[in-house]
Amino acid sequence: MEKNSHVKIFLDSIELPLRIGIFDHEKNAPQRAVVDLELYADPKTYLKTVNLETIIDYGVLYEAIKAWAIRPQVQLIEDYLKELLDLCFEHEAVSACRASIRKLDVFGKDQGAGVEVFMHRADWV
């Protein structure tokens, strides 16, 4: 039986306006987007050693994501996802992460589409 213990640190449903897309109509104004993020750590090591100096600080991740709202046009969701994965794996306690970004109004009001990735540290490095 596979051991499936983990600590999950997460940010849920961060909505922000993003200048994102490759089509002309996407370049005229920011689009509503939602970011979800989950970081996984080994509870055996993380919980036994966590303190204010070693904690995985979701506040830092939140601020980095919110700062995207003031950026110039980015073509692909995947560009943001790669940046987010880099940021997540900066913390050595993070063994894996799941990140998703979806544009909320792609096919009409509240009809979205997006990209999600789940990555282990060993596959990212």
Image (cartoon, rainbow, N blue to C red):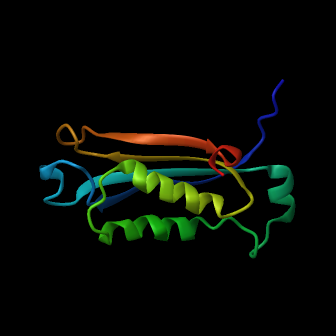
Whether residue 22 is visible to the viewer of this picture, yes or no, is yes
Give the side of residue 13 with respect to residue 29, left or right. Answer: right
Most foreground residue, 88 or 10 = 88
Residue at 22% from the left image edge and 44% from the top image edge = 105
Residue at 37% from the left image edge and 66% from the top image edge = 68
Give the side of residue 88 with respect to residue 103, left or right. Answer: right
Q: Residue farthest to the bottom?
A: 53
Residue at 34% from the left image edge and 50% from the top image edge = 76
Whether residue 13 is visible to the viewer of this picture, yes or no, is no
From the top left corner, tell me how far across and down residue 43 is, in percent. Answer: 80, 51
From the top left corner, tell me how far across and down residue 34 is, in percent. Answer: 37, 51
From the top left corner, tell me how far across and down residue 86 is, in percent. Answer: 57, 59
Residue at 84% from the left image edge and 23% from the top image edge = 1
Give the side of residue 12 with respect to residue 101, left or right. Answer: right
Number of labelled discs?
0
Most foreground residue, 93 or 86 = 86
Q: Residue farthest to the top?
A: 1
In this view, 54 is above or below 102: below
In this view, 111 is above or below 17: above
From the top left corner, tell me how far across and down residue 111 is, in percent. Answer: 25, 37
> Residue 71 is drawn in which quadrant?
bottom left
> Residue 31 is drawn in which quadrant?
bottom left
